[in-house]
Image: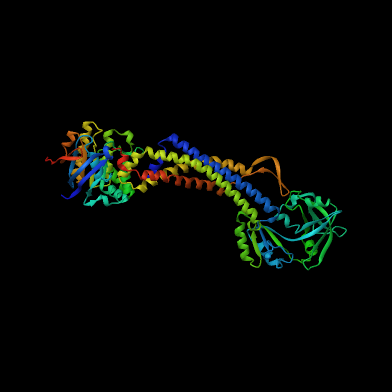
């Protein structure tokens, strides 16, 4: 399998002087296409920071991030936006749907940015809603959906642009355990069906158990990186 | 379409705030329209007074007569000029004139005067001369039973010479052929009052003046009214092309000082209104900035999922301009009947104002595309410009910071 995500000596610090906090310290990872990887660790261990650096939402203090062999540090702001739009799907802990748009429109918006035709967008939206099990709820606004349903919309939104990488920051943290497991199984199923690379952070053991690979972080340092067999 | 929908729905997130912003923009628009209508209406009225008193919308002269009048600088080929004026569809009316300085003798006094030789039938179609006759009656070109020709004098001149209707007046002037012209005329009418522009004038029938001044059938000037007074400059250009042997000038050129003063006054008013609208827009800027700050996280999400900085600038721009468009539309509906009334009926002034011998007791506005649409364009463009700083702020949002991870 080809490597789609690679970090080399990735470092990130916050603050300066005596108040400086090292969020990530010399992190080196390689993630192959189609992997279903969980990044684990306690709060403040650097999970979110690592995902944000991989997604180009933040800039490292040192080191590099390569996505499909491209060093994202060399991209301009607009190039990085386009790269994120076309190659990366984000799922956030607190869903982060646009409140004034319906579920369908939230999913459609990213395709609008891609310049997909209206007809193709509508078709793909219905496919995505079916994939995440939300048929018939497309016209509801986020406030009219449960937390689990909102996160499913977020999953559908992340996948609508047909990215090859999905980054999910504690996607089940705001959900009850049954809904969380159900969501992670949807993600797992999509990973198997579509071959997308999933990297998600969690500190829920039931969720970790469903990952192919576990990367455990503590104080910004990788403590464990193991492949798991199913 | 989805971006428009998103922008539209974002407007209604904070209904009360959007309503207050919309009211302030509507108010700004209406204030702008009222002021503009008043300024344009007043100036239009003044221009009418000015042009219909004597100047007309366009004048035709021989060469530089308008700047350096000499009695011999006449238009001789009248038929070629008049045939074009008669046939031109944009020319409403026209009248030929001659001028000359003269000395006027009354019963006891002598005073300098200005002779206006006017065509009795055509002149009233160009100016308000008939309305300005304050005593006696408008003259004819025929002599009275004693063989004396009629004259009308300005009220100022009549007072200076202490003459009234029915009195005789003696005029002495230089003829075009170098001779000394002198004759007796009978006063048949007093024109205007002592504040009139032509208070020192003495009106003679055109043919009488031509004979008195030895001008033959020549004239010094044609005064023309255009069918559409707003297109007089374009008409002047057309006429100039058709009659290259003479100088055709719009009133703006003839009365250049007045025109510049008017433009300066209009510009001053526009500046003041523009300043008021700008102050209104400082409030709008604050609202849009607040709206952007409140949605920092959302903009961070939009950037995370691939929105370019320019997409966010466009979104904020659309939101602001759409709100401005809605405000202006409401303002338009509210102000249109008022401006219509102001233009059609107008405000009655307590005391009538006399300008150029004509009384005006109503102040009227102007209803035109310019009055209604120019403020609209101004508000929309200002709204668009005002949206740029908040838009840039949204575009510069760092997704990591916006998502509130640290």
**In the image as oriented, which residue stretches furthest toward the right?**
B146
> Is residue B100 shown to the viewer in this render?
yes
Q: Nearer the viewer, residue B139 or B200?
A: B200
Identified at 73% across, 60% down, the residue is: B97
Say which residue appears at 83% left-offset and 62% top-offset: B182
From the viewer's perspective, is residue A162 above or below residue B202? Answer: above
Count of number-bearing discs: 0
Front position in the image: A192 or A174: A174
Give the camera-side residue of B113 and A127.
B113
Which residue sits at x=30%, y=34%?
A145
Quick check: B335 above or below B198? above
Pick the residue in front: A150 or B104: B104
Residue B262 is left or right of residue B319, and the answer is right
Q: Position of residue A11 (x, y in %)?
A: 22, 44
Residue A206 placed where, x, y %? 17, 34
As drawn, A14 above or below B99: above
- Name the spot of residue B390 as percent of width and height, x first: 41, 43
What is the image's colouring?
rainbow
Quick check: B22 left or right of A43? right
Is there any visible trace of residue A104 in the rendered image? no
Q: Quadrant of residue B172?
A: bottom right
- Answer with left or right where residue B193 lies relative to residue B344: right
Q: Quadrant of residue B317?
A: top left
Q: Can you say which quadrant of the picture contains the C terminus of chain B?
A: top left
Residue B330: where, in percent of width, then height? 50, 40
Relative to residue B179, is residue B3 drawn left or right? left
Q: Quadrant of residue B37?
A: top right
């Amino acid at each position: 399998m080809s490597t789609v995500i690679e970090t080399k000596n990735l470092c990130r610090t916050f603050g300066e002087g005596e108040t400086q906090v090292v969020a990530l310290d010399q992190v080196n990872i390689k993630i192959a296409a189609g992997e279903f990887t969980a990044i684990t660790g306690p709060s403040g261990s650097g999970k979110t920071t690592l995902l944000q650096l991989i997604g180009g939402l933040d800039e490292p203090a040192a080191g590099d991030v390569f996505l499909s062999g491209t060093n994202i540090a060399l991209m301009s702001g607009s190039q990085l936006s386009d790269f994120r739009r076309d190659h990366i799907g984000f799922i956030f802990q607190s869903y982060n749907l646009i409140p004034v748009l319906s579920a369908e429109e939230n999913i459609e918006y990213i395709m609008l940015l891609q310049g997909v035709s209206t007809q193709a967008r509508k078709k793909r939206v219905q496919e995505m809603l079916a994939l995440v099990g939300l048929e018939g709820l497309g016209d509801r606004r986020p406030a009219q959906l449960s937390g689990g349903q909102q996160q499913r919309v977020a999953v559908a939104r992340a996948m609508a642009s047909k990215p090859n990488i999905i980054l999910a920051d504690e996607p089940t943290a705001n959900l009850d355990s049954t809904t969380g497991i159900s969501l992670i199984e949807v993600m797992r199923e999509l990973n198997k069906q579509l071959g997308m690379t999933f990297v998600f952070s969690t500190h829920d053991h039931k969720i970790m158990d469903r990952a192919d690979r576990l990367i455990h972080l503590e104080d910004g340092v990788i403590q464990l990186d193991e492949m798991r067999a199913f | 379409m989805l971006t428009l929908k998103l922008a539209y729905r974002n407007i209604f997130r904070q209904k009360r705030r959007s309503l207050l912003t919309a009211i302030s923009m509507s108010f700004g628009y209406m204030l702008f329209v009222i002021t503009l209508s008043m300024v344009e209406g007043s100036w239009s009225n003044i221009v009418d007074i000015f042009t219909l008193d004597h100047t007309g919308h366009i004048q035709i002269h021989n060469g530089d007569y308008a700047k350096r009048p000499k009695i011999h600088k006449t238009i001789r080929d009248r038929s070629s000029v008049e045939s074009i004026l008669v046939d031109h569809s944009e020319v409403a009316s026209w009248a030929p004139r001659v001028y000359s300085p003269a000395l006027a003798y009354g019963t006891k006094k002598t005073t300098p005067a200005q002779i206006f030789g006017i065509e009795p039938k055509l002149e009233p179609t160009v100016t308000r001369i008939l309305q300005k006759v304050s005593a006696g009656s408008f003259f004819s070109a025929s002599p009275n039973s004693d063989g004396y020709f009629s004259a009308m004098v300005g009220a100022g001149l009549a007072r200076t010479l202490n003459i009234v209707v029915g009195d005789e007046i003696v005029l002495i002037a230089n003829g075009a052929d170098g001779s000394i012209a002198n004759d007796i005329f009978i006063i048949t009418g007093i024109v205007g009052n002592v504040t009139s522009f032509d208070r020192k004038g003495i009106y003679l029938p055109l043919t009488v003046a031509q004979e008195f001044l030895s001008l033959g059938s020549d004239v010094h000037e044609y005064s023309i009214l255009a069918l559409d007074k707003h297109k007089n400059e374009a008409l002047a250009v057309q006429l100039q092309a058709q009659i290259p042997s003479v100088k055709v000038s719009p009133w703006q050129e003839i009365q250049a000082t007045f025109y510049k003063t008017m433009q300066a006054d209009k510009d001053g008013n526009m500046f003041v209104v523009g300043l008021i609208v700008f102050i209104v827009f400082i409030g709008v800027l604050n609202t849009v900035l607040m709206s952007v700050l409140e949605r920092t996280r959302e903009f961070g999400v939009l950037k995370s999922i691939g929105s370019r900085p320019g997409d966010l600038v466009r979104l904020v721009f659309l939101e602001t301009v759409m709100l401005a468009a809605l405000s202006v539309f409401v303002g338009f509906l509210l102000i249109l009947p008022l401006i219509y009334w102001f233009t059609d009926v107008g405000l009655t002034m307590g005391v009538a104002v006399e300008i150029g011998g004509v009384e005006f007791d109503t102040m009227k506005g102007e209803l035109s595309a310019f009055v209604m649409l120019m403020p609209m364009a101004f508000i929309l463009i200002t709204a668009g410009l005002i949206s740029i700083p908040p838009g840039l702020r949204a575009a510069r949002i760092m997704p990591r910071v916006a998502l509130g991870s640290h």
